[in-house]
């Protein structure tokens, strides 16, 4: 049985390596560059507008004064933003960054920054399309790649294929990885039994997901900013303690990115591949996951949420991932043979004195919040796409039970093969989505021009279906 499992693992690893390291990364880079050019660098030109929209949407709404007061489903633009951040910010930011440095060297961080800067254009396009083609559900708006593939390209089989892939990837495979990470951290740090953690996580997950998207978004709105701020503050404290070494560390990152100086864990090729791969895994720009959250928001123009979700890419990679990178590089332990979450724990311990394992405890608690909010957001991506395939309460309830079960199973078992299958389904899902946004991207660009024209006239942009008359019949939530 062991030899069979080993053979399966070898096959899965080989297939996932080709799909993720070469095919998916190449196509994602091409898409990011293409949309950066066709939108004339929307992610750079309109960054001020992104911040303005996010700050405005974060305020409590006054029905008599707010143009973007939540309507159907009461999910605000800010809540949709935090829901997507909940899925993005997770083990990838703490363990994934550490792995990128361990395997690709400090230069991997430079390429992680690069893919975030250009990949934000893909995030803008896919999230704007999700808003344009969204539909009304029982309690909130719903949308995402499956919806814009069917309504924009009129291809049901393609849309259903994507819906199945994202449900398998996020709703099941990735959730088992998240629960496994939490259980690992608590067992290593406190000796807490995996079985008890499995039960706790499973019960908490079922309680929250049975409350619907409003409970999910409210939970994310409260927890995500708090956990991200706490983690960033810790990074700032560590950077402050090592402020005189900051020029040295920046030089180390940039130098290794181009093969200058010692390899320190990777060549220029491995630095680029690991940086791009882990960056894309973390910020999800172009994968097709974020649009599911973006579609839930109630806004007056699709571009508003497209801009906010593009800002989410920056938040994830340029802030949270960079925080982990600086913690590790300031510690000097990145070349000691450690990897993943252990490297992050050892780095914090080293920065704080290394005697009382404060880093291990903090990372353990942080992982609980990061990974658990990812479980909740991942669940919602699956529910949205199951309802797309067939809007059946029975199927949704069965899916909820499956998520509860997979969270339990993931916490008590090894997931090497599951990780491999997750990489494969993630790559196939991403390729499905990228093909769709290549085909439909012209609508997002036309919407961007409409938005900018209204802003130039001093207006708070409002979209009507008559603006794009060729697809007016497919944009039911924007009827005049």
Image: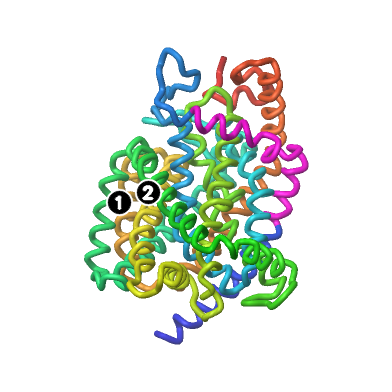
Q: Is residue 21 visible?
A: no
Query: Are circles 1 and 2 on residues that touch, CB within 8 Å?
Result: yes
What range is drawn magenta here? 27-56
Q: Around disc 2, counting alpha carbons within 10 Å, would you say few (fewer than 14), some (14 to 19), or many (20 or more)?
A: many
Q: In which quarter of the image is residue 221?
A: top left
In the image, residue 333 sits, relative to residue 402, either above or below, namely below
Horizontally, is 152 left or right of 365 in the view? right
What's the CA distance linking mark 1 and mark 2?
7 Å
Task: Pinpoint residue 74: horizontal percent, then vertical percent.
Answer: 39, 27
Q: What element carries label 2?
A: helix
Question: How would you classify the magenta stretch by its main secondary structure?
Answer: helix
Q: How many labels does the image show?
A: 2
Spot the residue most to the bottom: 3
- Of residues 107 and 118, the one nearer the viewer is 107
What mark, if any, has residue 376 been given in the picture? 2
Residue closest to the eye, 470 or 218: 218
Measuring 29% from the left and 62% from the top, which residue is drawn there?
A: 408
Image location (x, y in percent) of residue 458: 65, 16
Q: Nearer the viewer, residue 31 or 52?
A: 52
Q: Residue at x 49, y 74 (%)?
A: 339
Decide if residue 148 is on the left or right side of residue 186: right
Residue 349 drawn in magenta: no
Circle 1 Cα neighbour tier, 10 Å, few/some/many (<14 / 14–19 / ≥20)? many
**Residue 78 shows up from this direction:** yes
Name the one closer to the observer, 291 or 104: 104
Secondary structure beneath dot 1 equals helix
Which residue lies under the disc numbered 1? 205
What residue is at 59 percent from the left and 34 percent from the top?
A: 50
Residue 119 picture location, percent across and down: 65, 49
């Amino acid at each position: 049985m062991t030899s069979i499992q080993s053979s399966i693992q070898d096959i899965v690893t080989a297939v996932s390596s080709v799909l993720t390291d070469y095919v998916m990364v190449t196509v994602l880079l091409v898409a990011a560059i293409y949309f950066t050019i066709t939108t004339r660098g929307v992610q750079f030109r309109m960054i001020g507008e992104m911040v303005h929209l996010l700050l405005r949407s974060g305020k409590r709404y006054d029905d008599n004064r707010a143009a973007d007061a939540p309507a159907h489903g009461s999910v605000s633009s800010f809540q949709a933003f935090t829901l997507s951040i909940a899925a993005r910010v997770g083990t990838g930011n703490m363990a994934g960054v550490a792995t990128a440095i361990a395997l690709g060297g400090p230069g991997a961080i430079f390429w992680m920054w690069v893919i975030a800067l250009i990949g934000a254009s893909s995030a803008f396009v896919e999230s704007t399309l999700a808003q344009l083609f969204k539909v009304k559900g029982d309690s909130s708006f719903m949308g995402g790649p499956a919806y814009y593939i069917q309504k924009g390209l009129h291809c049901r089989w393609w849309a259903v294929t994507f819906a199945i892939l994202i449900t398998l990837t996020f709703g099941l495979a990735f959730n088992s990885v998240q629960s496994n990470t939490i259980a690992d951290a608590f067992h290593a740090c406190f000796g807490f039994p995996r079985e008890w953690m499995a039960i706790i996580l499973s019960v908490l997950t079922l309680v929250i997901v049975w409350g619907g998207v409003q409970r999910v978004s409210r939970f994310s709105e409260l927890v995500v900013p708090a956990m991200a701020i706490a983690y960033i503050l810790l990074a700032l404290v560590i950077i402050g303690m090592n402020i005189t070494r900051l020029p040295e560390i920046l030089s180390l990152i940039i130098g290794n990115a181009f093969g200058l100086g010692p390899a320190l864990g990777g060549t220029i090729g491995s630095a680029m591949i690991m940086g791009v791969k882990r960056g894309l895994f973390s910020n999800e720009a172009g994968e097709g996951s974020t649009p599911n959250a973006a579609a839930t928001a109630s806004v007056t123009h699709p571009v508003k949420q497209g801009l906010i979700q593009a800002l989410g890419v920056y938040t994830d990679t340029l802030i949270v991932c960079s925080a982990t990178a600086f913690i590790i590089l300031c510690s000097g332990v990145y070349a000691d043979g450690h990897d993943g979450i252990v490297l992050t724990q050892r780095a914090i311990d080293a920065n704080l004195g290394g005697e009382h394992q404060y880093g291990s405890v903090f990372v353990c608690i942080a992982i609980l919040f990061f990974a658990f909010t990812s479980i909740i957001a991942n669940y919602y991506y699956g529910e949205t796409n199951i309802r797309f395939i067939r809007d059946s309460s029975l199927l949704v309830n069965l899916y909820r039970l499956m998520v509860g079960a997979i969270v339990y199973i993931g916490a008590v078992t090894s997931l090497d093969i599951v990780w491999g299958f997750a990489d494969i389904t993630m790559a196939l899902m991403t390729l499905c989505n990228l093909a769709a946004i290549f085909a439909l991207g012209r609508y997002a660009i036309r919407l961007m021009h409409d938005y900018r024209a209204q802003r130039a006239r001093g207006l708070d942009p409002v979209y009507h279906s008559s603006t794009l008359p060729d697809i007016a019949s497919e944009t039911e939530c924007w009827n005049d």
